[in-house]
Image: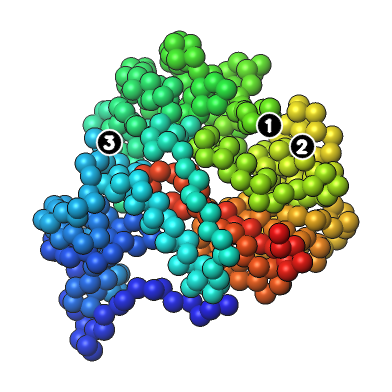
Amino acid sequence: MARRTTGLRFQPSGGARSAPLQVGRKQVLTIERLAHDGRGIAFVDGRTWFVSGALAGEQVEARVLGARNRIVDARAERILGASPLRRDAPCAHAGRCGGCTLQALPHAEQLALKQRTLAEQLARFAELAPEEWAPPLVGPEFGYRRRARIAVRWEAAAGRLEVGFRATASQAIVAIDDCPVLVRPLQAVLRALPALLHGLARPQALGHVELFHGNTSAILVRHTAPLADDDLQRLRVFCREHAAQLWLQGKGDPQADLPEAPLGYRLEPWGLELQYRPGDFVQVNAAVNEAMVAQALEWLSPRSEERVLDLFSGLGNFALPLAQRSREVVAVEGVAAMVERGRENAVRNGLANLHFCQADLSKPLAGASWAAAGFAAVLLDPPRDGALEAVRQLGSLGAERVLYVSCNPATLARDAAELAGQGYRLRRAGILDMFPQTAHVEAMTLFERGSAAR
């Protein structure tokens, strides 16, 4: 594996220790380029500044948010010389809400930043480049997000309830009455939600509120104390008005107010429906999720006689479509509740050749009964910390093809180096624009052994 470097130019100190920077201090900066997280990078007096809200080539007045050693976190307060790429942010809350940090950058430039991030991480940490770059998988720029968490906090001293999203680099809550990245049904819910919550008799009992949309909308109310009967009735009326399910969560797991109402989403191209519960992991972007599944099937190309392994399988988002094309699919997941949900989804969709198993995928897989017969192909979609332990064992499973879906290019690159060491070639790679208006990078890579080239 290549020696790890940051790729950032840190200026020498010249042997003299600079005076500490105070939070709130302002500094005029010239932004040289964008970091992988979308912040601008500038260099002054031996310090490297990371500036949110700034674009490459701009001159800005920035306010210090924090400093450690020679790294400074800052926020652009004024744009003194704007980049020709800068656009007016489509959302009125941009710059205050901590959600969408790239709204000033046109969508094409957002995609280019994500593409560079993936390429640089693969080159730096794994010394790899794919034989073929795939075009980015994209969906709508706005109106794509089908779940969101709304912060709620009772300020006892002021006697008021705060409702909104977390501010940038802060625990402060920004009052939000509109969010253009939410799907339309949830936009309507969000616009009406603050008035509902402010009108409750006992708002002190509220923890937070989560919004979901799939085959229907759903609202989860997390409460830290029992809800008053009148407040519960107000919530039920609100949900009926917005054609939404009501879910409640106290000390235990979320519970549906009307348990007979299922919550789920469809994978329409394959005629599949997956049911889930609030708290389960579900991809936030329905359009890109369908495109991602389709591309995964195309790249992995499972054949009707093959046995396929799906690691970190969750509800079965990949496993169910894979089972329609393979002799057998084994789906492995670490969370017991998700394994049970996956089994229910397999039965509900009539897939008898799909088997869900529970295993700790951070531990060796040797000895697992489901691994003994080996696999022709493997798909894995791990969390941000990657899948190094599982990847170390893929070669022993006999897999000719490995498709890796990642939400963190750094751990993907680390794991790619391990696969390369086992004799796998990086055949294809591409980004998945799951979170437009943010710097979050999702990626798909296909690895093949030499004999599997097509």
Q: CA distance from mark 1 to mark 2?
A: 8 Å
Res. 48 in view: yes
Q: CA distance from mark 3 to mark 1?
A: 35 Å
The mark total stands at: 3
Mark 2 Cα-neighbour bin, 10 Å: few <14, some 14–19, many ≥20: some
Q: Nearer the viewer, mark 2 or mark 3?
A: 2
Tell me the quadrant of the picture where the C terminus can be found.
bottom right
Does 437 appear above or below 6? above
- Judging depth in this view, the residue of 409 and 198 nearest the camera is 409
What is the quadrant of residue 141 in the picture?
top left
Sequence-wise, the earlier of marks 2 and 3 is 3
Amino acid type, label 1: Trp
Res. 72 in view: no
Q: CA distance from mark 2 to mark 3?
A: 42 Å
Does 18 appear above or below 112? below
Q: Position of residue 68 (x, y in %)?
A: 30, 69
Q: Position of residue 33 (x, y in %)?
A: 28, 64
Residue 270: mark in rendering: 1
Sequence-wise, the earlier of marks 1 and 2 is 1
Amino acid type, label 2: Gln
What is the quadrant of residue 445 in the picture?
bottom right
Q: Position of residue 36 (x, y in %)?
A: 39, 60
Amino acid type, label 3: Cys
- Residue occupying image coordinates x 28% and y 32%: 175
Q: Circle 2 sits on which residue?
A: 324
What is the quadrant of residue 81 in the picture?
bottom left
Q: Circle 3 sits on which residue?
A: 91
- Residue occupying image coordinates x 50% and y 45%: 137
